Image: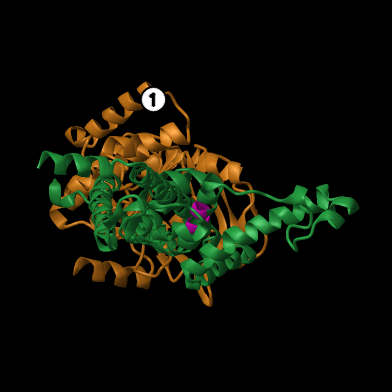
Amino acid sequence: MSDNLAFWLSYLTNGKHLTWYASFQFTIFAALAGGMLAVIFGLAGATLKNSRFFALRLIGSTYSSIVRGVPDVLFFLFFPLAFEQAVEWFMASQVCTPETLAAQSATWPPCKEANWFLGTPEYLILASVSLGLVYGAFATNVIHGAMRSVPQGQLEAARAYGMSATQVLWRVHIRQMWVYALPGLSNVWMLIVKATSLLSLLQIADIVLWADRLGAPNYLSAVGLVHDDWRWRYYLVLFVFYILVTFASEKAFGALMNRAGRGILSEARS
Amino acid sequence: MAQAAAANAEKLPVVAIRDLHKSFGALEVLKGISFVACEGEVVSLIGSSGSGKSTLLRCINMLEVPDSGSVSIDGEEIKLSGDAPHRQIADERQIRRIRSELGMVFQSFNLWAHLTILQNVMEAPLIVQKRDRSEVEAEARAMLDKVGIGEKADAYPAQLSGGQQQRAAIARALCINPRVMLFDEPTSALDPELEVEVLRVIKVLADEGRTMVLVTHDMEFARSVSDRVIFLHQGAIEEEGTPDQVFDATQSARLKQFLNAAKHD
């Protein structure tokens, strides 16, 4: 029995497993950063949609209607690559000389100096921005609707007491908007959490990639077959992780709702 | 009352409205209205629904921008630019400064739901007038005591009855030290038994000699509180005078009809 325990302890703390555990931070970082950016893009998009100027309204509604329809997997593949190549193209126009252009045998980048090497941190940031852009379009719609739900009379009262447009927006309008936006934003957040399982598409060695690798039949020539196909067990761990995240999110959104709804949702508790 | 009106004739006009016109689309709501409210005077606007009395009141602080005509507060004309229907406020700074001296009380209270009663009362003095917090808080508490809801300072608006909410809204208007109080049908959303407590507060303010413009459906109250009553009919002033003149020596046939109908409410 103790042998068994010792085996499992050492198996579960071997280098690959430790790397797997560490890779949870990528998923959590991408979810949090993506979520934050989605809210920021959502606020910006909703403000554009509410703008007095037609051109700005057009940008806002184009963003929320077009980007919502793009599959997140596709955007995940498209945006970081397009961004990387755009940077490289710009760099090439700055640093490449005829000699280096001639020396380059590959088709891209134009010259070696213009190459932009992306590591995990860079990809992680690009992934977060992609998540923020895609789900910010959903958040735009959620926040836009929530802004319209705030009672007009209270905005009018704020104007009648001499508040500037900016003061009305931040002190009354956005402050009260959260109550109406949070249920929708919690949906968007759950979609973002789910989309974090796509990180491996961007060469990030994330939890899904490692579960795949660790669960595959493990054959060492010195030992023989360590284990056969264990992938479902590893996937099960991911299930449990995502369920725990869901549970924690529900709690967090409940607390946020209580905070944002103070006074507005408190009739029942008076 | 007659002496009061005579005394007022020598005082400065605090609100002066000249030849106000306003249309919503094809509907002409105000057809050239002029009146003044002098220092310490209580002017009531009466008339049936759709007579334009609320729109007129909302033009005083430019919540509605009139198509033509002018509004002056303490002799300072509010600057407007452009032509109807795109006439707009020309000077944001000016209108914010003027609005910060006009205490508006709405039919539906319009307290800020996310703030406590005390925070509601302190908001404009702190944020717009940028006054000192401790001074504002002392004054806000005094105002809440004055309207009789001092013990509700830390409650949220939704936890109060309609009458209490409206009194809180009056305290909010008082706390900006307004030059004029503007009341837009302050008791129309209230049950009769809650109406009384709000009317009592407004009466106290009138007796203190505050300048007030009041839109109301309550003829008894208009009579008891006003120095001058203006009857609006289809966007024009049909009759105006002291309460005694308007209610007891009625000239206009339309006003007679209106007052008769009001009695049977």
Q: Identify the residue shown where x is 47% and y is 32%.
A: B129
Q: Is residue A2 above or below residue B64?
A: above
Q: Position of residue A45 (x, y in %)?
A: 52, 59
Give the amino acid type for the residue marked by disc 1 in the picture: Arg
Along the line of sight, which residue is nearer the eye, B243 or A43? A43
Q: Is residue A102 left or right of residue A118?
A: right
Q: Chain of mark 1?
A: B
Quarter of the image with the C terminus of chain B in it: bottom left
Report if residue A41 is visible in the image: no
Q: Judge by depth and name the residue closer to the eye, A31 or B50.
A: A31
Residue for badge 1 = B133
Q: Which chain is green?
A: A
Magenta stretch secondary structure, dominant:
helix
Question: At x 35% / y 69%, what residue is drawn?
Answer: B49
Q: Is residue B27 above or below residue B228?
A: below
The residue lying at 52 percent from left, 44 percent from top is: A121
x%, y% of residue B205? 30, 38
Q: Nearer the viewer, residue B190 or A119?
A: A119
Report crowding for label 1: few under 14, some 14 to 19, many 20 or more residues within 10 A (C-alpha): few
The answer to which quarter of the image holds residue B97 is top right
Q: What is the magenta range?
A: A127-131
Extreme front residue here?
A222
- Which SS class for mark 1? helix
Would you identify the image quadrant in which residue A237 lies?
bottom left
Q: Is residue B119 visible?
A: yes
Q: Quadrant of the N terminus of chain B?
A: top left
Which residue is at the far right? A98
